[in-house]
Amino acid sequence: MYVCLCNALTDGQVKDAVAAGARKPRDVYAHCNCAGQCGTCGRTILGLIREMAAEPGRHATVQ
């Protein structure tokens, strides 16, 4: 599913970025070689980051 239309980022790309260490939306953008544009996707990306951090076996700290 597309999470960010401006950058054509999918939830899979966001999950890959989080698995690689992204802990903030700006980390996801950096991992995907893009930048936040309209800001609409920020909450969705943050939600995915928090969702993955809450999964059993993950010890990520989300700020």
Image (spheres, rainbow, N blue to C red):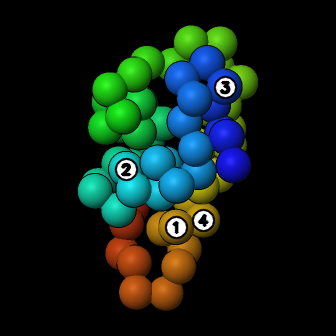
Q: Amino acid at mark 2?
A: Ala
The disc label shown at residue 51, or none: 4
Q: Earlier in the sequence, mark 1 or mark 3?
A: 3
Q: Is residue 31 left or right of residue 53?
A: left
Residue type, numbered disc 4? Glu
- Is the C-beta separation of discs 3 and 2 under 8 Å? no
- Residue 56 visible in rendering: yes
Can you tell which of label 1 and label 3 is closer to the viewer? 3
- For label 3, the residue is 5
8 lies above or below 56: above
Circle 3: element type: loop
Distance from disc 2 to disc 1, alpha carbons, whole Å, reads 11 Å
**Which residue type does callout 3 highlight?**
Leu
Residue type marked 1: Met
Residue 56, compared with residue 48, is above or below; it is below
Residue 63 visible in the shown view? no
In this rendering, the label closer to the viewer, 2 or 1: 2
Dot 2 or dot 1: first in sequence order is 2
Which of the marked residues, 4 or 2, is nearer the chain's N terminus? 2
Image coords of residue 41 (percent x, y):
66, 31
Q: Nearer the viewer, residue 9 or 54?
A: 9
Residue under label 2: 17
Residue under label 1: 52
Task: Give the quadrant of residue 57.
Answer: bottom left
Tell me which residue sits at (32%, 26%) in the image.
33
